[in-house]
Image (tube, helix red, strand yellow):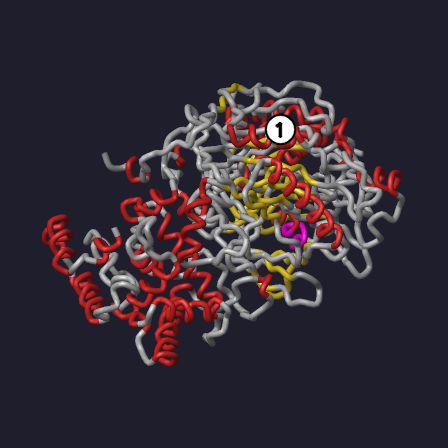
Amino acid sequence: MATTLDKVDVVTVGVGWTGGIVASECAKSGLKVRGLERGASRGTEDFSMAHDEFRYAIRYELFQNLSRETVTFRNHRKMNALPMRMMGSFLLGEGLGGAGTHWNGQNWRFLPYDFEIKSITDKKYGANKLGKDYLLQDWGITYDELEPYFTKFEYIAGISGEDTNPFWGKRSEPFPTPPMKKTPILEKFESATSNLGYHPFMLPSANLSEAYTNPDGSTIAACQYCGFCERFGCEYGAKSSAELTVVPTALKTGNYDIRFHSNVVEVLKQGNKVTGVRFFDTITGEEFIQPAEVVVMTSYVMNNAKLLMVSNIGEQYDPDTGRGTLGKNYCYQILPGATGFFEEQYNTFMGAGALGMTIDDFNGDSFDHSNLDFIHGASLSLTQTGVRPIAFNPVPPETPAWGEEFKKASIHYFTRTLSIGGQGASMPHKENFMSLDSTYKDAYGVPLLQLTYNFTDQDRALHKYLSERSAEIVKEMGAEIIAPANPLTDYDIVPYQTTHNTGGTVMGNDPAISVVNNWLQHWDAENLFVVGAGNFAHNGGYNPTGTVGALAYRCAEGIINYSKTGGSLV
Amino acid sequence: MESKKQGVSRRDFMKTTGIATGTLIGGGIIGGLVGYNVNKTPGKKETTVDKHQGQNHELNVGLQFFKTTASFNVLSQATERILPEDELGPGAIGLGVPYFIDNQLAGAYGMNAKEYMQGPFEDGAVTQGYQSRLTRAEIFEQGIAKLEEEAQSRYQKGFVELEPAQMDEILTAFQKGEVPMMAVSSLFFFKLLRQATLEGAYCDPIYNGNKNMEGWKMKGFPGHQYSYTKEIENKKFVKYDPQSISSMTHS
């Protein structure tokens, strides 16, 4: 029998960037907010001994314990979906800060083009550029409308960068902190891409170039370039995260608390409103109901979608009929690139998660696609994130994967390999979606989320074109051996690729094709908000966090307005 | 360098470790040593990896998972073929990789503590990944036994008695998924073995691999360093004495 707790104004399911942002803004405005986080508390003090590749990067110290919950996966509807039994293609987070604790800190704003991709594509290339199986749609919001929220997030996080990229949207304010240090490796990329006529610039970074105090009064330290960012927490407090910024801001108000070890299993709905959430205390096993005036889904893409599905809120997407919106437009990130093997040795082990330079000459619609069989593109970057020896054993093509030759080559090239990597856009396809699994369950008896996903022709064409451009850059950099990325075949959930999963709870201005409106308010329940990369109608050519942060600030404003007026915000 | 390593004798082993650890010598290690001697093939020193390598190890390192030295020795030789000793430095045995793997198999890794292990189990497609009902510990036990079986059926010898090229031939058959195993493919076992070998070679020494940080020294990886702020713009390659994370808890 569930124990019912005292009602709060706002409850967030999960406390990472989105939960923290919603909490800080709502608590500042006087609303009583409670965060339910299924993991534990953690902070900078927990990461003093985090320079341990094996524990953190290989044994997944900071990630979800899959024995309790995972997802099932199939490439297409004719396959049986089976559980992802070991962590692989993407890393599900857990604990205070969520994936925003172990991110690299590459912080982007999606392009103006992204938000109006369907209108722009149809107008420029005709209505049938990709064919009817691609569910391209506008986001129901423009870049200009989102711009203040991008700025807000960047100033809270203290993003380091330079506004010299001719292809991205207009910024109302300069970056809050200057770009990171330009290393010899980055200079190599800069001169090669300049020689080729492109426009290199320093990648916007949440590993800060200098100590910074944000408008809420939180201080983020200066990055030490130690080379342990992605999959690690920062022991210096130099990588911007929710627990360094928005969470303490919310706690300071006295209007916020976080209940840890609280795993939400259902959103409770009556009529056209939600009443709260049901959760289990993961330590005692006790069941609770947390009533709330407003429920905000602020967990990861997959869990946000899953909880709506198990709670029967919204209509599940059906690829046969095209009806339903929940679970549709699931996208990933396409990763073109090329690796260069060099003669000289570089300090590749030094670095930071967002230390890099980028070109956008082949991103969005910065180049003409009239004679190409794909749309969009990728940001192409050389990042110096700090290589580590278990995971990084680069060998030229045709080298055996083990034995004497492998050992010699992998040791030789550990400090002589530089790669161009693309964050490639991913377009929604009618056969790529999320639903509930009918066989496998989590530790609480709730069905697992089921992923049906494969790469499409658009993805393969984009990947090929961008990998060729990457190889040209590597060549211009003077590599001895050039290895473009292998052509895309079928999506494989085993090797790590990227934790940039998007869609499933997309935003829009039409309830027939979106789950939430452009305030991230659910179309079918006015006091339910769903925010995160799940709102992306497609995935753009950048890492997602900057855009997620902006949407969370937009969402927070929507909740505050809703608390005053009620009703639909659109 | 190579001849010196190959010349490590049982007496040298006793001398070194005895001095270092006094009375802490345990039966498991001695047993392991005896096992290596029994399997040694005289006259093959030029071409085979010396069976004593890796035995010159601190005595707080021992077997937590394998019950017989025979199976541990098979594991050791298999890892050594994946990462052999050469002029650059020690191979898997010299780096302590077999002990690292043994120790990992005894714990959460071996028991699949953080993996989803609920049925029903189906083979699935390659793109769906690991679908075995077996834990890693069970896969290693079976895989090591299969390596030995394969050696016996192909050459009527134990795996550790084979020439390196013969070991490679068998490992390649595993890598190609050609060796029948129960409830798992030999390819999957091989992938686990290869990955575990790299983990043991290059992990922080606190996990009983990467002995004396020799793996890091070969690769030019400095391990745990507090900051590179002063060197990040340096145009020259900077060499560091590597440092273990244990330097933070031991003075």
Query: On the image, which quarter does residue B251 sit in?
Result: top left
Q: For the stretch drawn in magenta, what is the main secondary structure?
A: helix
Query: Which residues make up the magenta segment?
Result: A306-311
Residue A165 position, x and y percent, is 69, 26
State whether residue A256 appears in this view. no
Instruction: Provide the chain ID for the residue under circle 1.
Output: A
Above or below, comparing residue A126 to residue A197 in the picture: below
Which residue is located at x 59 percent, y 32 percent?
A: A189
Residue type, numbered disc 1: Cys
Depth check, front residue: B177 or A115: B177
Above or below, comparing residue B163 to residue A118 in the picture: below
Which residue is located at x 49 percent, y 24 percent?
A: A220
Which residue is located at x 76 percent, y 27 percent?
A: A145
Depth check, front residue: A523 or A52: A52
Residue A351 position, x and y percent, is 48, 33
Residue A341 position, x and y percent, is 52, 43
Which residue is located at x 21 percent, y 70 percent?
A: B42
Residue A320 position, x and y percent, is 80, 61
Question: Within the magenta stretch, is there residue A318?
Answer: no
Q: Secondary structure at mark 1?
A: helix
Query: On the image, which quarter does residue A173 sit in?
Result: top right
Circle 1 sits on which residue?
A: A26
